[in-house]
Amino acid sequence: MRLAPAPDQPQGRARLGYADLPRLMALASGDENHQGAAASTLDVLWVLYDRVLRVDPRRPHDPERDRLVLSKGHGPIAYYAVLAAKGFIHPNLLAGFGGWDSPLGRHPDRRLVPGVEISSGSLGHGLPIAIGMALALRTRSAAGPRVVCLLGDGELDEGSVHEAIAFAGRIGLDQLTAVVVDNRSARWGWPGGVASRFEREGWTAATAGGRDHEALGEALADRREGRPRAVVAEVWQA
């Protein structure tokens, strides 16, 4: 298995825009089972990398970087497309997606792809890992890097996520943001909406259109001291 090109090389510094993302995603093939899951995350991922996260493809291991934990790691072609557009990987790698010798697997691998923080794909693991990261960063600096965890609404059915939501709210982990892509795939749904699940555990929460870049940007920018933040990105109407 070969590594993706190092981001300090010229081919790793492509700068493309939002309009290029459909073309980049089209380079990848063979993801029939999770095409919808990938498309549902595209706009959220773009807003995070374009407006919110303090990350630099030339320094993917900078200790002061913000961290994105992709808990919704199945169907990652949108994630790879955004990483390519922002210069973490070469766009040509997308054509080999899922191949035996490609670093771009059907689940992202942090050892192979610059900018990937965790190897994910098994639902329910990302938020507990993000809490561990945020706690470690908080011991180093009260105003340290931000940790953002991207989940699907179906993941909220997992017991590990229930416990993580309660724990983060109890300890006031304000370096943590959870972004839930809501495509109404949760088994039972959430009375009062997904945001209420977080609010009752002490988080601040907002709901925004999952394709509305301005609304997403505003919701992600609104943070409160002493409380973790949840942003629900609704895509079921998009």
Image (cartoon, rainbow, N blue to C red):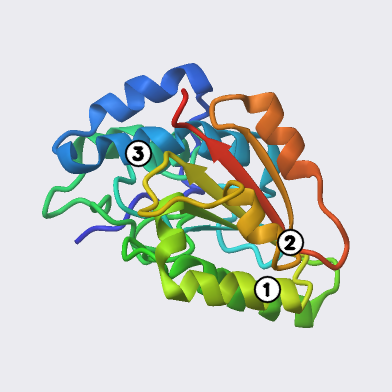
- Disc 3 is placed on an element classified as helix
- For the point 47% across and 45% down, which residue is it? 88
Spot the residue most to the front: 191
Image position, residue 147 (x, y; %)? 65, 61
Marks 1 and 2, the one that precedes in the sequence: 1
Which quadrant would residue 221 be assigned to in this image?
A: top right
Between 171 and 101, the one nearer to me in the picture: 171
Identify residue type, mark 1: Ala
Between 188 and 112, the one nearer to me in the picture: 188
Between 7 and 105, the one nearer to me in the picture: 105
- Mark 1 to mark 2 CA distance (whole Å): 8 Å
Residue 147 visible in the shown view: no
Q: Look at discs 3 and 1 and give the one toward the viewer.
A: 1
Image position, residue 66 (x, y; %)? 66, 57
Left/right placement of residue 51 relative to residue 152 reads right
- Disc 2 is placed on an element classified as loop
Image position, residue 70 (x, y; %)? 46, 56
> Within 10 angstroms of label 3, few (less than 14), some, or many (20 or more) residues?
many
Task: Tell me how many marks there are.
Answer: 3
Residue 27, relative to residue 113: is it above or below? above
Marks 2 and 3, the one that precedes in the sequence: 3
Identify residue type, mark 3: Ala
Contact between labelled residues 2 and 1, with CB atoms less than 8 Å apart: yes
Contact between labelled residues 1 and 3, with CB atoms less than 8 Å apart: no
> Within 10 angstroms of label 2, few (less than 14), some, or many (20 or more) residues?
many
Residue 203 tag number:
2
- For the point 44% across and 66% down, which residue is it? 118
- Disc 1 is placed on an element classified as helix
Left/right placement of residue 185 relative to residue 210 reads left
Q: Which residue is mark 3?
A: 38
